[in-house]
Image: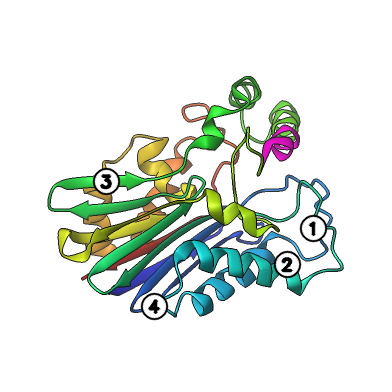
Amino acid sequence: MRVAIDTQPGGAAPNEDWVAGTPTLAVVLDGLSTVGLDTGCQHGVPWYVRNLGSQLVATLADSATSLTAGLAHALEGVAALHPECDLGNPGTPSATVAILRQREGYLDHLVLADSPIVLDSYQGFSVITDLRVDQILPELKAEVARHETHTAGHKEALRNLVLAQRETRNTETGYWVAAASPEAAEHALTGSVLTEDVRAAALLSDGAACLVTDYAMSSWAEVFATLRDGGPRELIDTVRKVEATDPRGQRWPRYKSGDDAAVAFCQW
């Protein structure tokens, strides 16, 4: 498996996405924004995704370890790195997870939350994603969308949304992300396909996938053509060019003018 990767911040703040690739593994993590709220952790989201990613790559190097077990082990490992922090805080650093691993003629996948894995197969494109977060708090999301980005009203609405999301995060009635507890791994979407049925695959944080999913400015076929011709950097640059035409979020209401973006492009 040949893996090309790239990640770029969406603005001046530190990048909260993380990506890695090996000859058998690709991982994309998208850290959840804290919008300045207390997390109970002195380290921050970039530290969290960096350490979670490193633990995942090390643990999943053993093909006998399932993706679910590997994620649970990695979550335990990161929690053990900062026991002095309040890991019970509902805003403890957290992230979405997308993993693809090649194993003995199969491609195993794991998705936790809304960073999709897109497979380019001989039957067409298939998108593996977990959109449970989209099904909760629709009124608060609509209030965020009502305001232009960077306005006082937008900041207040986003803060209220994140506060409410924290209360539903990693609960049976809400949605699941990687955080402090290994229990989240049991709620990930997993599966396998034959490697011979897939021509290429892309793992994307929502800051890159939005070109198709939110902005509808590209198709998956066009995304894969861009990835083949110019790689992940060109895809992210394309997203930035589109966002630059709507800096205040009038055409495409969103949480930030530009979100952190990460891409892993896999070919065989």
Q: Which x, y percent locates residue 169?
A: 67, 41
Q: Nearer the viewer, residue 216 or 37?
A: 37
Is 244 placed left or right of 191 in the picture?
Answer: right
Circle on res. 87 = 1
Q: Mark 3: which secondary structure? A: strand
Disc with the residue nearer the chain's start (3 vs 2): 2
Quarter of the figure with residue 220: top left
Q: Amino acid at mark 1?
A: Leu
Q: Please give the name of the residue rendered at 69% of the width and 57% of the height, measured from the top-left corner.
A: 181
Q: Mark 1: which secondary structure? A: loop
Q: Which label sits in the foreground, 2 or 4?
A: 2
Disc with the residue nearer the chain's start (3 vs 4): 4
Q: Mark 2: which secondary structure? A: helix
Q: Which label sits in the foreground, 4 or 1?
A: 1
Q: Which x, y percent locates residue 133?
A: 56, 36
The residue tagged 2 is 79
- In contact (CB < 8 Å): disc 4 and disc 1: no
Q: In this view, which residue lies farthest toward the left?
A: 122
Q: Please give the name of the residue rendered at 31% of the width and 71% of the height, measured from the top-left corner.
A: 102
- In contact (CB < 8 Å): disc 2 and disc 1: yes
User: Please, is residue 124 above or below residue 45 in the view?
Assistant: above
Graded by Cα atoms within 10 Å as few (under 14), some (14 to 19) or many (20 or more), the crowding at tag 3 reads few
Distance between the alpha carbons at the discs numbered 1 and 3 = 36 Å
Specify the segment rendered in magenta. Answer: 162-169
Distance between the alpha carbons at the discs numbered 2 and 4 = 25 Å
Graded by Cα atoms within 10 Å as few (under 14), some (14 to 19) or many (20 or more), the crowding at tag 4 reads some
